[in-house]
Image (cartoon, rainbow, N blue to C red):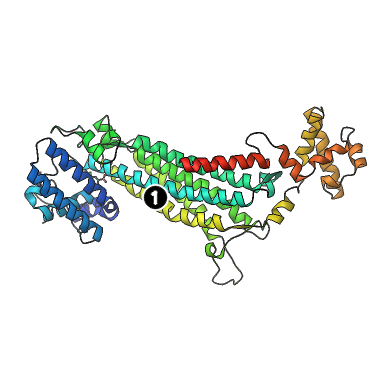
Amino acid sequence: DKVSLWGGRFAGGPADALAALSKSTHFDWRLAQYDIAGSRAHARVLHAAGLLDAANLEAMLAGLAILSADVASGAFRPAEDDEDVHTALERGLIERAGSDVGGRLRAGRSRNDQIATLFRMYLRDHARSVASLVLDVVDALVDQATRHADVPMPGRTHLQHAQPVLLAHHLLAHAWPLLRDVQRLQDWDVRTALSPYGSGALAGSSLGLDPEAVAADLGFTGSVENSIDGTAARDFVAEFAFVAAMTAVDISRLAEEVVLWATKEFSFVTLDDAYSTGSSIMPQKKNPDVAELARGKAGRLVGDLAGLLTTLKALPLAYNRDLQEDKEPVFDAVDTLEVLLPAFSGMVATMVFDTERLASLAPQGFSLATDVAEWLVREGVPFRVAHEVAGACVRACEERGIELWDLSDDDLAAISEHLTPGVRDVLTVEGSLASRDARGGTAPDRVAEQRERVVAAVSAA
Ligand code: ARG
């Protein structure tokens, strides 16, 4: 006979097809230790409320300790007939502490407040581990930026050469969004640190159990204000899934650049053998699979978020069984990031840049034309005119197949009376970089300061 939590009202057990549909142990078992921690805290408030005497409390905690060890060792596993993690663990406790003691634990709680609490506990732990893995990527970027403090590269807009920038500036431009993702997880934690335990099925508990005591016991900052909200809300799951997706999307933007940079045509980076793959047929191939998988997994995490939001859309209050569908997408998001991020930070840490190539390409494609225009502005020329004059320089160079700095003093003077030889000061990459010295700019001093602020933000995180 199937063990069920609601036998009293029912003449028979569930159909096999229902049991198969209903079952969630294949994915919610990972919450088992959180469920046991919740049970310990619940046993203590039952005792505090006078509903469990000291001997029973002791027997229950002893049973839970054995159960926890058996779950950890794998000696206790969900059985075929267990519907979910809660059902399985209640059976496990009864097997260990006896049905009189074990059967007392369920008073004043529901699987609805239980699951809402455990899920928060699980995600809060993984928010911390994911954040630390994201910070490893930031560290790898900062190390590369430190090693290449003075290396210029072609800065791009529309993927076209735009203006020279420091490689360090570009790498740190990838660090900031990742730092914000970590901050998002920390902000999220403030809202998620409230325990729904004590909400019961939806209406709260009548047994004099103290939700704040359970919350403190489980490491929450407090308990929820509203028992309906406590059991029905899943915005904390969706918000986590958003940050996970955003992190993967941020990673994917660097990944895409690495894929480009590793091509023969760009030849900006060589990937370490440990973070490259070969081809089963083409002996010469060295492929950037880590970066490609990062790009691909970002799509998967966006899908996890979209699926979750679709489950929540228009779902009436309070608990509905649809909510059982909230776990797999975000478990997938956690698992994906926890396997992706270490590989990604390893790849970033070990990339070798062709610094000479980066430097020599930095001024090509007339990327100093803006510097000519801005030099003219500093000479008192209106920007509209300056833009036109600099454009005429580019056109003259293009016609003759030369670069801006190849124009002679006579060529310059012929284009505009304003173009005196002093303009040559900004026709070098160094001059261009050094001139962009406002806060946030690519001048070497500013970038060095910026790097220190990233380092400070990492230690503060
Ligand atoms: N397994 C369910 C879930 O993951 C929790 C149990 C609540 N089930 C119920 N029939 N009230 O959401």
Relative image position of residue 420 (x, y in whole percent)? 88, 36
Depth check: give the residue in front, 23 or 351.
351
Q: Is residue 139 left or right of residue 38?
A: right
Q: Which residue is mark 1?
A: 334
CB of residue at label 1: within 8 Å of ligand 1? no
Q: How many marks?
A: 1
Q: Residue at x 34, y 50 (%)?
A: 328
Q: Quadrant of the C terminus?
A: top left
Relative image position of residue 121 (x, y in whole percent)? 30, 44
User: Is any part of residue 68 visible from this angle?
Assistant: yes
Q: Quadrant of the N terminus?
A: bottom left
Q: Is residue 56 left or right of residue 142?
A: left
Determine the image quadrant of residue 72. bottom left
- SS state under label 1: helix
* Above or below for 111 versus 224: below
Relative image position of residue 118 (x, y in whole percent)? 27, 44
Q: Residue at x 15, y 48 (%)?
A: 61
Q: Residue at x 75, y 47 (%)?
A: 363
Q: Residue at x 36, y 34 (%)?
A: 191
Determine the image quadrant of residue 119. top left
